[in-house]
């Protein structure tokens, strides 16, 4: 089985404290015999493509990297950024497009998508017409409570 693992929160380098459970989950899936490819955010100091603990990690570049990659350096995720800088909400569109293009490129070659956090889920949902793959969704933290307030949570 080949799994496309999509997460906006993933370690930037070995030993990084950002999203350590994500690499652990990807490794555990591989230990069970699955082939895992991770799509995650590109950021300052990260590689566009690498093997991390035996897991293939792809970080697509953003349309405007100098304006977007600062997101990797802000604690609290996008809601915190948007609260402090409301105009940063405009970054959502090119972020979403970059992720959608990567999912379209790799999704058709996988058996299943496993998406984490709302933005990855949205990108996978918008590209479903193209890849036609089942999507396992995992929400984390406050997203669980916010999701129920949307029409998708009905």
Image (spheres, rainbow, N blue to C red):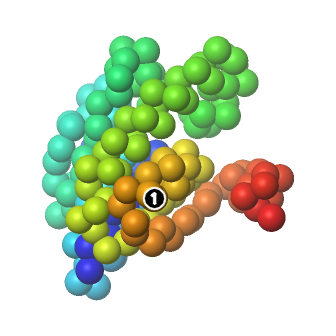
Question: Residue at left 26%, top 50%?
Answer: 105
Question: Residue at left 33%, top 35%?
Answer: 42
Between residues 105 and 65, which one lies in front from this camera angle?
105
Between residues 8 and 149, which one lies in front from this camera angle?
149
Between residues 74 and 152, which one lies in front from this camera angle?
152
Badge 1 local density, few (<14 within 10 Å), some, or many (20+)? Answer: some
Between residues 1 and 101, which one lies in front from this camera angle?
101
Dividing the picture into quarters, in which one does residue 35 lie?
A: bottom left
In the displayed structure image, the side of residue 46 where residue 144 appears, left or right: right
Looking at the rendered structure, the number of numbered marks drawn on it comes to: 1
* Residue 39 picture location, percent across and down: 33, 50
* Residue 11 picture location, percent across and down: 36, 47
Q: Quadrant of the C terminus?
A: bottom right
In the displayed structure image, the side of residue 110 where residue 138 appears, left or right: right
Question: Residue at left 76%, top 61%?
Answer: 153
Q: Is residue 136 above or below residue 143?
A: below
* Residue 10 picture location, percent across and down: 40, 49
Whether residue 41 is visible: no
What residue would you read off at disc 1?
Answer: 128
Whether residue 140 is visible: yes
* Residue 64 picture location, percent across and down: 37, 18
Q: Is residue 113 above or below residue 12?
A: below
In the displayed structure image, the side of residue 96 where residue 49 appears, left or right: left
In the displayed structure image, the side of residue 58 where residue 74 appears, left or right: right
Residue at the front extreme of this rendering: 129
The secondary structure type at the circle numbered 1 is helix
Q: Quadrant of the N terminus?
A: bottom left
């Amino acid at each position: 089985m080949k799994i496309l693992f999509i997460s906006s929160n993933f370690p930037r380098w070995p030993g990084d404290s950002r999203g350590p459970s994500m690499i652990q989950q990807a490794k555990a899936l591989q230990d069970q015999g699955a082939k895992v490819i991770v799509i995650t955010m590109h950021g300052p100091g990260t590689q566009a493509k690498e093997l991390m603990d035996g897991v293939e990690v792809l970080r697509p570049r953003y349309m405007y990297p100098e304006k977007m990659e600062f997101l990797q350096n802000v604690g609290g995720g996008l809601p915190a950024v948007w609260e402090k800088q409301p105009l940063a909400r405009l970054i959502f569109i090119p972020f979403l497009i970059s992720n959608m293009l990567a999912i379209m490129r790799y999704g058709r070659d996988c058996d299943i998508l496993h998406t984490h956090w709302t933005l990855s889920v949205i990108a996978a949902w918008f590209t479903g017409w193209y890849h036609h793959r089942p999507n396992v969704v995992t929400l984390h933290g406050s997203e669980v409570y916010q999701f129920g307030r949307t029409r998708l949570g009905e």
